[in-house]
Amino acid sequence: MPSIAENLTLIRTNINQSINARKGGHQAVMLLAVSKAQTSNLVREAYAAGQTCFGENYLQEAINKQAELNDLEIEWHFIGPIQSNKTQSIAQHFEWVHGVDRLKIAQRLNDARAHQSPLQICLQVNISGEESKSGVNPEELITLAQEVTKLPHIKLRGLMAIPEPTEDPTIQRSQFIKMRTLLEQLNQLGHQLDTLSIGMSNDYMVAIEEGATIVRVGSAIFGARPSKH
Ligand SMILES: *Cc1c(COP(=O)(O)O)cnc(C)c1O
């Protein structure tokens, strides 16, 4: 099995290739290593290989890991579903939150962040339109973005999506194009959003070709996640 360092090297090469294959600009891409369900030691191994941004889905697991790794200069991103009773702790323990899809959640994160630098957030969009998926519907996105932009302790950076899982690159691409179009629409309305958080292990290259600026990659770095018991 390839090591974490070898996986990271390969992914960075792929990322650079995809940036060069983009039709639009060559804006940099942040590789976010998704370390949910992985041990602190594996995070340490990735860090030693030059990886500094990590994404976590589960608050308590993340807080434990942060304590074990507090000698490292890691930028932590919260990418999981957000329960409103966890907003205080999320705002205090993370620099970025990707899955904001309701004004109430944004307000609570904002209030909890009053004594720190602004929290960097992305609005999660339900791009596949599946009932079960979290995320704001595209029709409601403009209103939500307008309201969130007014919050002083939050910096709205862009949009995030977890597209419908598919191996079909045409469907993958069309969902990413929809996301890029929504971002462009918001910027035409006067927003200054620079972030498109789309793309995971099986589709990050297509996502970058269509404008991703953050890719959230877990299993391609760490291998398959251990199953929970
Ligand atoms: C788990 C997860 C990822 C990473 O998924 P992989 O397929 O392992 O790369 C990315 N984003 C979110 C929101 C996740 O929950």
Image (tube, rainbow, N blue to C red):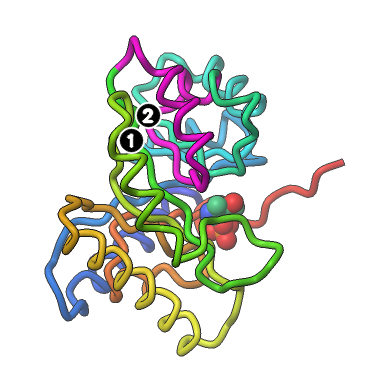
Relative to 202, say whether 101 is above or below. Answer: above
Label 1: state its secondary structure.
Answer: strand
x, y percentage for residue 210? 30, 75
The stretch of residues the image draws in magenta is 89-116
Q: Please name the residue shown 35% across and 51% down the image.
A: 31
Residue 217 visible: yes
Q: Residue furthest top?
A: 115
Disc 1 target residue: 120
Q: Quadrant of ligand 1?
A: bottom right
Q: Label 2 is placed on what type of residue? A: Glu
x, y percentage for residue 83? 65, 34
Whether 107 is among the magenta residues is: yes
Q: Quadrant of the N terminus?
A: bottom right
x, y percentage for residue 122? 39, 46
Q: Quadrant of the C terminus?
A: top right
Label 2: state its secondary structure.
Answer: loop
x, y percentage for residue 93? 48, 21
Q: Give the class, few, some or many, for how many residues have Cα within 10 Å of label 2's Cα (few <14, many ≥20).
A: some
Label 2, ligand 1: CB separation under 8 Å:
no
Q: Are marks 1 and 2 in contact (CB under 8 Å)?
A: yes
Q: Please name the residue shown 34% across and 23% down the image.
A: 73
Nearer to me, 156 or 6: 156
Relative to 82, say whether 210 is above or below. Answer: below
Q: Give the class, few, some or many, for how many residues have Cα within 10 Å of label 1's Cα (few <14, many ≥20).
A: some
Q: Left or right: where does residue 26 sit relative to residue 130?
A: left
The numbered mark, 1 or 2, whose residue comes first in the sequence reads 2
